């Protein structure tokens, strides 16, 4: 009865999404863990402190470059959630390893920020680099350059304190992600041909993008998971970064289990599709960017079928992530996945 009531509350649009996520996860799993909410506050405060520590160096460098005594700097990113969830998992399941867990999380947080800033610089997207003084586009370009290079130097310095395998795993993930980025022109050309009605291009999108196969199988995932639509391309696009992050914890001898590891990567791939790719559909279509969402609108029989497919594929990732989170006894991850699920808005899509 309580779970049915929780399910009803989760569907109440008048409640905040965060509250609906808590009730939704309870309705789905039968787990209501009040301690996880206190744990979330502890993790948020600790990771926010890590970001402030890193940005203090950035602020000092920007102030020196622009001739100010002090500047305030912020950077908007959604990439830190997996690091927060992992720290929360270790706080609960390995409390004796708090110091080492925080030390590795500091590295993970700064490496994620550095990578995101590097991508923003490459794409010449500077709006998320915020400072408290009047800055034109060229000023923002310089701010972005300073911020990313300071973060990169801090990351390099921290690797010295960890086993060589930690650095090797990071380098492997960066190389694989960049290799995927190098394929972008090919995917754009495929999309253009498919939009012009080229059946061969449509077939190639289906075979080489939607159902691409791995040359080197990631052992973390089951055969069924590796066969999910778009898994290989989206693993190379975003999943590999978080797979590597969890491997870095393992190389640092922190007890991050396979089930939790899998839940994080599946949730991130699902979030990329269900939140970012759905929200960006019209922009991606206009710019010729092939994503799972734009691909479905090329491959499906009509718009309604494409929209249904996007919902079903997204749910296949996020439902698996929730099940893995429950099996790993990570209520925070389950609630976070439920939040992702309830934050998606397929009504922005045609059909």
Image (cartoon, rainbow, N blue to C red):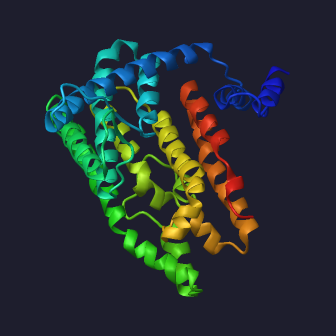
Q: Quadrant of residue 323?
A: top right
Q: Position of residue 183 (x, y in %)?
A: 37, 69
171 versus 197 height, above or below: above
- Is 202 displayed left or right of 70 in the figure? right
Where residue 126 appears, x then y in whole percent? Answer: 34, 49
Q: Is residue 216 above or below residue 14?
A: below
Count of all numbered marks drawn on residues in the image: 0
Relative to 145, 7 lies left or right: right
Image quadrant assignment for residue 90 = top left
Camera sees residue 31: yes
Residue at screen point 27% across, 56% down: 175
Residue 285 located left or right of residue 103: right
Q: Please, is residue 189 above or below residue 296 in the view?
A: below
x and y, in percent, of residue 277 in the image? 55, 56
Q: Horizontal placement of 194 versus 29: left or right?
A: left
Out of 257 and 208, give the one closest to the viewer.
208
Q: Quadrant of the N terminus?
A: top right
| Residue 237 at x, y percent in the picture | 42, 56
Residue drawn at x 50%, y 44% is 268
Q: Nearer the viewer, residue 40 or 211?
A: 40
Which residue shows up at 38% across the image and 24% down it?
A: 47
Quadrant of the image containing the C terminus: bottom right
Q: Does residue 210 appear anywhere in the picture?
A: no
Q: Residue furthest front?
A: 134
Q: Residue at image x 39%, y 47%?
A: 127
Q: Is residue 302 above or below residue 279?
A: below
Q: Residue furthest right?
A: 1
């Amino acid at each position: 009865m309580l779970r049915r009531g929780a399910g009803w509350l989760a569907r109440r649009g008048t409640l905040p999404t965060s509250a609906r996520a808590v009730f939704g996860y309870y309705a789905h799993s039968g787990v209501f863990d009040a301690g996880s909410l206190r744990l979330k506050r502890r993790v948020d405060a600790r990771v926010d402190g890590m970001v402030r520590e890193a940005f203090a160096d950035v602020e000092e460098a920007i102030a020196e470059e622009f001739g100010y005594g002090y500047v305030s700097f912020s950077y908007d990113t959604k990439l830190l959630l997996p690091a927060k969830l992992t720290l929360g998992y270790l706080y609960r399941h390995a409390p004796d390893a708090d110091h080492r867990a925080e030390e590795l999380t500091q590295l993970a947080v700064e490496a994620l920020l550095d990578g995101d800033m590097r991508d923003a610089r490459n794409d010449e997207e500077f709006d998320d680099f915020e400072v408290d003084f009047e800055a034109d586009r060229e000023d923002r370009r310089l701010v972005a350059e300073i911020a990313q290079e300071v973060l990169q130097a801090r990351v390099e310095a921290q690797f010295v304190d960890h086993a060589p395998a930690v650095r090797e795993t990071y380098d492997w993930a960066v190389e694989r992600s960049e290799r995927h980025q190098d394929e972008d022109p090919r995917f754009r050309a495929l999309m253009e041909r498919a939009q012009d009605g080229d059946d061969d291009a449509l077939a190639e999108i289906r075979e080489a993008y939607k159902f691409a196969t791995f040359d080197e199988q990631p052992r973390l995932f089951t055969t069924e998971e590796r066969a999910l639509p778009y898994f290989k391309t989206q693993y190379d696009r975003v999943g590999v970064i978080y797979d590597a992050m969890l491997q870095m914890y393992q190389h640092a001898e922190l007890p991050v289990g396979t089930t939790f590891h899998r839940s994080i990567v599946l949730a991130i791939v699902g979030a990329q599709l269900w939140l970012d790719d759905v929200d960006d559909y019209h922009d991606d279509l206009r710019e010729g960017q092939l994503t799972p969402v734009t691909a479905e609108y090329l491959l499906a029989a009509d718009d309604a079928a494409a929209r249904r497919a996007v919902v079903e594929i997204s749910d296949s990732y996020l439902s698996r992530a929730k099940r893995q989170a429950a099996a790993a006894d990570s209520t925070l991850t389950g609630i976070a996945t439920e939040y992702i699920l309830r934050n998606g808005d397929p009504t922005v899509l045609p059909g």
